Every structure is written in structure tokens, then in C-alpha cells.
Amino acid sequence: MVRSTFRAARIACFSAVLAAAALAVPTGAVGQGAAPSPQQDQKTAPVPQAGGDKSQAVPQPGATPQTAPPSPVAKPAPKPAVSEGIKTVRERLDEIKGNLDGREKAVTGRNVGAGDLTRARDGLEAVSDRIRAIIAALEPRLEAARERQTQLGPKPKDTEEGEDVAKERVEREHAVTEIDETQRLAKSLLVQSDQIVDQITNKRRAAFTRGLFERSSALFSPDLWMKIGADLPRDLNSLQAALEDIVTLFARNGSLWNLLVLGIAFGISFALYFGRRNIAPKLGRRDPKVANPTRRAKLLAAWRVLLLGTVPAVAGSYAVYYALDATDLLPTRLMPVASAILIGLAFIAFVQALSDALLAVGKPAWRPTPVSDAAAWRIQLLAVSIAVVITVSKSTEALNSGIYAALSISIATRGIGAVTAALLLAIGLHRFADTAEKEEACFGPYVATETSSSIGGPLRLLGWAATVLVGLGAIVGYVALSAFLVDQLIWTASLFVLLWLLIASADVFIGGSLSDDTKIATALQANTGLRKRSLNQIAVLATGFARVVLVAVAVLLALAPWGLDSNDVFSSLRSAFFGFKVGDVTISLSAIVFGVGILVLGVFITRSIQRWLENTYLPATDLDAGLRNSISTVAGYVGFLLALALAFSYLGLSLEKLTIVAGALSVGIGFGLQSIVNNFVSGLLLLWERPIRVGDQVLIGDSEGIVKRISVRSTEIQTFDRSAVIVPNSNLISGVVKNRVRGDRTGRVIISVSVLRNQDPVRAAEMLVACASAHADVLKEPPPRVVFKKIGDPFLEFDLIALVTDVNLGQKVQSDLNFSVFKTLSDAGFIPAMGPASSVVTVQGLEPMRDALGQIASAVGTGAARSPVTAQDAPEGGDRDVEPARRKLGTAAS
């Protein structure tokens, strides 16, 4: 009794001291875990406590400051208390640790079933998200605590630091330690959760593989059929007992209301199935009179047929199942049998509706798929037959499970179903052989032609491989594998057909609505100001994105039965997006996306500032054009470097790492990479400044052509003789390049024309300008002009100068203008006709001789005029002597 009283008194005193300390210490000091003051230490004496800090002190009864014994040994500074925020986080982590430990214990047990693995996996992503949130929340607090600790600097070794500084150092070191320990605990729990996920995934895959490749009795094994014969009477008795249970339940629960509900359900189901079979095709609105419907109309009709053929069947099956479940007219163990039958009927309706939607048997004009009539009929018959076999097989398996049939009968049922499906698939593949339609079309022997079959070779080869594998698996004894392959063939084929229909619909309804002249495209152009070319690009991107999403979903659904869990897929995608480690490097797609976004935003802001400087601010100053261009260019480079630095800092690339990379590059340059680095930097300058762009017509040395591709090392130029010239980027930066389309694509055409000297030059210039103005590709502003270059003998030389709309049309316009100018000047007589009679030869340097001969000819002509001589009076041979002389004089004069 005395001991308990004394213990209670000690506890009360200790609590009073803690309360007094809490009141005495300021609020900020409590949050930082401040130590008691020296005055408090003098008034207290240490009292050991179980499980606590032995340096804690409590006041002694009746003690005064004068009688308190001094401490002979200097006491160390007490450890600051854990802050309330960290304490709350620790409590959360302890709770999470208990959750993870329970899941790990459930997973690592001996007899772990599929249900245990499912329960251990459910909710684990939420736990991991909570851990990641805690780690992310602690990160800035840890950085702030380390920054505060860094501000104190290193602890001095030779001298003692002040009491306040020492106290502050202890508090800050404690804050850093407790936050760091808490974060490391959270990271260890995150690793534990990932390990649990890996364990669950591995166990699931192992169980799936073990069950899939488990060998049973062969289908045609005599032992199997002997066991079936021995177990058949017992299974028949079980079936009879199940029927008796049904009769008993009908007698017990077969009230008028239950029977009415069941009858209404069957009536609704029958009406829906009947309407689907007879009324739905008419509502599909496939008018046989329409000879050439559009692809949009075909796909709309296909979706109508598919929905009208599937939804009523599903609704009818669900109505019957709901009635059976609500009225309790069927034993619980036989409800899966009813479910299998009803789902099978809905599946048969779906397969029939899907084949009718895509194949349109009897209506080839409305068929979206490019198959012939015979192939369409065969595909539909094959698909419906396999669906019926699958339904019968699944229903029989459910019945075996409901009556607890023997294992031998279950094996035989699944094996027969798999072999029957394989036989149907083999018959269908044989019907699609290359010789099938050709042998039916002719009565003679088969003659090979160039026409192809309806189904491609690789697809048929894959079908034959699956058929052989299913049949051999069932015969050898791998019945589970054969049944599973049949299910996956049907499932994958259905997904493939639906994927084709969805992709075709996306191309038509998304791409076609945006790219064609539809109401949607017109409205978008009118309301958003987008050009038709931009809408076409958006349509291509949207269609491509839809295709990627549809293919990804189809692949996930196709792989789901093979043991792929959707949670595993989403966790992998999340890890890839938010960060995964490769060695010591953490790769985060989200960080990369945000870093690129920061860079793009920085470049956009830089370009906006550049445009403002070029168009608004700098023109208002007195600076010359060259200085204004330099200022705007430097501003662009500075803005780009700042945006690049911000993006790198967000990605975690510090300046130290960039310095290491720069050092490595300098070492590489020292080993002979100057040319590569020069071309690389030149390529970056070309891509950034864009003095030369793809599509420009440039002249580099003796090579002229069109720029086809600009990379970081070289530029490809295609000449007009279709040759490819590879030019290093350094040559483009340091050399002289003539860009014919740098400012715009207008070009200049110059035609030199010579007209006779005796013609009017003004009239000739007017005709030349008229020929150029009449050409459609010649710009009207500025108009064509004529330059009078030279007054020659005997020609006047002109240059016709015209600007064309595109430099690529220069040679064509030049040729057209040559034809037009030649015809116009020839018709006007400004260009003499070419030939021997009109050929003129000009000899330079004979002007004095020409003048002398001219004087002689004048004198001779004057003498002849004074004394005319007739032909009769002239001496014999006179004419023969005069005429050659005249001809010689005329030739010399010329």
C-alpha cells in the first residue's frame, strides 16, 4: 500500500514538472524540442524513470535553492522531444507497416489460394500512394532543415562555441535526424509494398502456368472412358437429384407472384430475341436500292445492326437471370448453369450481329469489309457455329460443376468441346483455301491464276497452327491448355474484329469530320479561325491518338486472360511516369514532360519579348538597324539559355553535372573531335537561327538545289539533276551561301533581246513589256521593265526584267517569254528573217577603204551620166567588164 502510494506520488510530481516546463518554454522552443534552462536544472534533481530519459529531473519536496546540492558532473544537453508533426507521421507509418506486414504474412503462407492473393493485392496501390505522399511531403521539410543546419557552419574544433549556438545546433541536428529517419522509414515501407506486389504477381503467374500445363488423361485414352463408365451412374443420380431439387423449389416457392414474375421475364426475353432476329435488321436501314453508299453510311449501318442485334439479347438474358435469382425457383448450385446458358445465348447473338454488321450477307453494297459474297457467308457460318459449340461446352461444364460430376466427365466434356471447335476451325480454313472457290467456279482441273484468296496466307497459317495445337493438346492430355486456347482464340478474334470496326469508325467520324468539308469543320473554321490545313493536322493527330488508345486497350484485354493484372499494368505505367531507377539514375517521364513544358514556355516568352523589342521598343529608339538586330538576337539567346537552365534545374541537372559534361567534351575535342563538335554546334545554330530552311533553294559553290534535310551534323541538298549533295554544317556557317528564297519566294527573270537598229526602240520596249505582262506567273507589282543596254551596229540590245511569283517557276517563265517575245518581234519585223540572203558580215577596220571605193564609184557614176552609152555603141565585152567591177565594189563596200 505504501509502495503504491509512493509510486503514485512520484508519477504526479513528474507530470507536474512536465506541465510546468511546457508552460515555461516558449511555443517556438517546444516545437523545436528546446532543452531546459540552467536555472531549471539547478532547481531539479535527476530521478530515473522506467523506459524514459534518466536525465529528467523532478522537484524534491521541501527543497529550496539554498539547500539544493550542486551536481558534481556536468550534465549533457537533453535530447529534444520529437515534434508533433513527425510524431503524427510516425503513427501513420506504423499503421501502414502493420497493414503491409499482415499482407506479407498472408502472401508468404503455405496454402495460399487465388482468393488470398486477390485480397492481399486489393488496396495495395492506395497504401503505396499514401507512402509516396508522405515521402513527397517530407522532402521539402528535410531540405529546409538541412539548409538551416548549413547556415550554422561546421562545429569549431579548437574553441568552444557559445551556449545559444550549441543549443541551436543540437535542435537543428535533431530536426534533420528525425525527418531523415522518418523519410528513410517511409522509403523502406515503399520498397516493402513493391516487394509484396512482386510476390503476388509471381505467385499468380506460377499458379496460372501450373494449372495451364497440368496434364490429365488423354481424350482417347481407354482408362478415361472406363472411369467415365464407372462414374456415369453416380453423376446421373446427381443430375436426377438436381432435377428433384428444382421440382421441390417450384413446389415450395412457386407462388402465383413468383410464377408471374418468371413468366413475364421469359416473355420479355422471347420478345427481345424475336425482335432482334426479325425487326432489328429492318431498323438497320440498309436499303438494297442504294448502289453506292458512302463509307460513313456503311459504318453507321454496321453499328446500328450490331447494337440492335446485341443489346436486346443481353437484356433478355439478364431479365431471365434476374427473375430466377429473385424468385428462388432454382437451386443456388444450379444458378451458374443458368448463367452459362443465358450468357451463351447472348454471346451467340453478339457473334451473329457482329458478323452481320461487318459482312452484310446478301447486301454487298453495304459491306464495310473487302470480302466476297461467298467468303462473307462462310465466315458468318463458321463464327456462329463456333459460338454455338463454345456455348454448349461452357454450359455443360457449368452443369458438371453444379452436380459435382466426376473429374473424368469434366475432362471429357472440355476435351470434346475443344476438339469440336478445332474441327470447325479446320473446316473453315479448308474452305478458305486457294483452290476452294476456283474448284467451284469451274468443272475442269484447277488452274493456278494470279487471284488471291479471301484470307491472307499468314492469317491462315496462324489458324492452322492453333488448330493443330488445340487438337493435339486435347488428344495428348493437355485438356486445360486446349480449352484455354480455344477460349483465347474466340476472345482475341472478337477483340480484333471490334478493334477493326472502332479504328475504321475513328478514321471516318473523327478524321473525316475534321478534314472534309463537313459542318463540323466549317463551324470550327468559322469560330476558331483555324485554317483547313490546321484542321487536317488536328484530324491526323486525333485519329492517331485514337488508334494508339484503342490498340493499347485491345492488347491489355487480349493479355488479361494470360495472367496480366490491370493493377500491375497501371502500377508499371505509374512508375514509368513518376520515376523509375536504372542503376543509380532515376528516370521520370513526368519530370521530362514538365521540363520540356518549362522549356517551351520559356522559349515562347522569349520569342514574345523578342517580337516586342523588334516591332515596338527598338524602332522607337535612335539606334541603327544593326545594333537593334544585335540587341534582339542577344535577348533571344539569353532567354533561351535561361529557359534551358530552368528546365535542367527541374530535371535535377545541376551546374556541377553540366561542368562534368563540358569537361568530357573538352577532352574529346582535344582528341580530335573538333570537326564533329564544329559541325554539331553549326547544326544547332542552323536549326535555331534558320538562315537556311528545308525547302529553300540555295547555291553553295557550284551546287544549286533544294534543301531536303537539316541535321545536327550535315545538310542534304537535292540538285536539279536529282543528285544529293551532303554539305557539312560548318561550311554553311563559315562559307558564303546564296539563298534564293530567304526573304520570299519571288524570283527574277532576265531576257536579253536584240532588234534591228532601224526600228523604233520605244515600240520595241512596249512590245516586250506587253509580252511579260500577259504572262500569268509574272508579278504585276512591281511591273516588268525594259533596260536599253546598248546601241550596237546593226542591233539595239535590250534586257527584259520580270519578277515571278515563285523562284521555281523561273525557267518555265523564261521559256514562255522567249517564245512570246520571238513571235511578237518577228511578226512586227523587229527581228530579221534568218537565211543566206539576209546574212550580213561585218568586217572591222576597213572604213578608209570603204570611203575610197565609195568615192571611185561616185566618180564612175557621174561620168556615165554625162556620156551615156547604149548597148549597141558599147564595145564588145564592155558589159562583161563593168558588171564584175560593180559587184566587187559593192562587196568591198559591204
Image (cartoon, grey):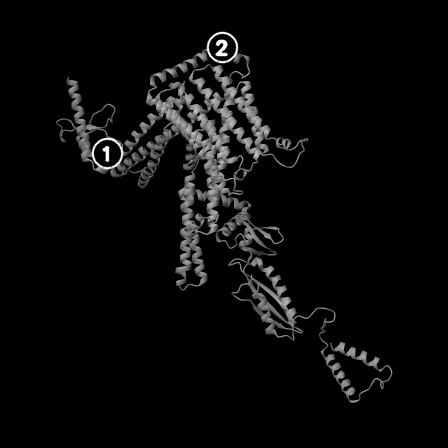
Seen in the image, is 93 located left or right of residue 696? left
The answer to whether residue 508 is above or below residue 179 is below
Foreground mark, 2 or 1? 2
Question: Which residue is depicted at the point 73% across and 68% down?
Answer: 835
Where is residue 237? Give x, y as percent: 44, 12
Seen in the image, is 1 located left or right of residue 659? left
Give SS at disc 1.
loop
Dot 1 amino acid type: Ala
- In the picture of the structure, the residue carrying the numbered disc 1 is 35
Where is residue 107? Give x, y as percent: 39, 22
Q: CA distance from mark 2 to mark 1?
A: 86 Å
Give SS at disc 2.
helix
How crowded pointer 2 is (Cα within 10 Å; few <14, some 14-19, many 20+) is rated as few
Query: Can you see residue 653?
Result: no
Question: Which residue is depicted at the point 52% across and 19% down?
Answer: 416
Q: Furthest-right residue in view?
A: 876
- In the picture of the structure, the residue carrying the numbered disc 2 is 230
How crowded pointer 1 is (Cα within 10 Å; few <14, some 14-19, many 20+) is rated as some
Disc number at residue 15?
Answer: none
Q: Closer to the camera, 810 or 698?
A: 810
Where is residue 46? Give x, y as percent: 20, 27
The answer to whether residue 754 is above or below residue 64 is below
Q: Closer to the camera, 750 or 145?
A: 750
